Image (spheres, grey):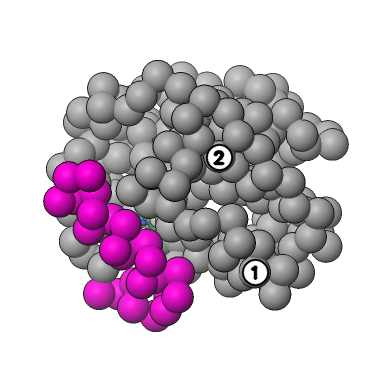
């Protein structure tokens, strides 16, 4: 891992255990991804959405309102837009430059973007029936708040445990169970892994 990737892993480990410490990492992480934004599309691997797609294959019904948190240049948001032609999709990211790129790369008017921090999302309670995270630090309280009852969460990591931003499935299950999620399913695809969970 590069120094930047090691920093992202360190921030992930700390923030998952102590979400209040995100305020220490917010500035450096945002600047790191602002810098990466112009070349983000070219530095990702070809199969980086495979685990996410494998988890979406397990959904019992197509969602209507989808949020992709830490959307970066919007690839997962566009994927959801193409997969679910009836759905409204929002991609949220703390990096303004990433959101600029995402908007530039997106044609569908059903797929929109917000500059927003996952620690405090600018959405009402129970606003979404699907929330996706692809290589993104989970903020569990906010995920539990914005997902409607019977809605789903997918947390995917492109390179499995080798992904710089990575949270082990046991930890995800533990944190999500405490917040009313159940019916977990773990999938592997490409080089990575994903966890699907349903909000009760
Ligand atoms: C590793 S990138 C993944 C981008 C995208 N999901 C993908 O798979 O290409 C992580 C993204 O999460 C964003 N991010 C990190 N912490 C965030 C937070 N608290 N709120 C919103 N976005 C955040 C970063 O700006 C970056 O765009």
In space, the residues marked 2 and 1 are separated at their CA atoms by 17 Å
Q: Which residue is mark 1?
A: 174
187 vs 170: above or below: above
Taking depth in this image into account, of 31 and 85 the one nearest to the observer is 31
Instruction: Say if residue 57 shows up in the picture.
Output: yes
* Residue at (75% x, 52% y) in the render: 184
Tell me the tag on residue 194.
none
Instruction: Say if residue 129 shows up in the picture.
Output: no
Q: Is residue 15 magenta?
A: yes
Within 10 Å of the Cα at label 2, are there few (<14), some (14-19), or many (20+) other Cα atoms?
many
* Residue at (43% x, 37% y) in the render: 159
Q: Which residue is mark 2?
A: 193
Q: Secondary structure at mark 2?
A: strand
Residue 47 place in picture, x, y as percent: 46, 22
Q: Which residues are magenta?
A: 1-24
Residue 73 place in picture, x, y as percent: 36, 33
Q: Does the magenta stretch mainly form a helix, a strand or a loop?
A: helix
Taking depth in this image into account, of 9 and 90 the one nearest to the observer is 9
To which quarter of the image does residue 163 belong?
A: top left
180 vs 109: above or below: below
Residue 154 place in picture, x, y as percent: 63, 46
The verdict on label 1 being within 8 Å of ligand 1 is no
Check the picture and name the quadrant holding the C terminus.
bottom right
């Amino acid at each position: 891992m590069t120094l930047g990737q090691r920093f992202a892993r360190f921030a992930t480990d700390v923030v998952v255990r102590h979400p209040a410490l995100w305020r220490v990492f917010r500035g450096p992480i945002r600047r790191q991804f602002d810098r990466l934004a112009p070349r983000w599309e070219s530095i990702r691997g070809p199969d980086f959405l495979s685990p996410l797609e494998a988890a979406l294959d397990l959904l019992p019904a197509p969602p209507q309102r989808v949020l992709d948190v830490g959307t970066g240049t919007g690839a997962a948001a566009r994927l959801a837009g193409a997969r679910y032609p009836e759905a409204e999709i929002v991609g949220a990211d703390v990096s303004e430059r990433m959101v600029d790129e995402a908007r530039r790369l997106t044609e569908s008017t059903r797929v929109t973007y917000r500059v927003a921090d996952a620690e405090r999302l600018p959405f009402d309670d129970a606003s979404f029936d699907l929330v996706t995270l692809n290589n993104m630090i989970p903020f569990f309280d906010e995920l539990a708040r914005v997902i409607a009852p019977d809605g789903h969460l997918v947390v995917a990591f492109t390179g499995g445990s080798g992904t710089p931003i990575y949270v082990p499935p046991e930890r995800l299950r533990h944190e999500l169970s405490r917040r009313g999620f159940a019916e977990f399913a773990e999938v592997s695809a490409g080089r990575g892994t994903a966890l699907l969970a349903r909000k009760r």
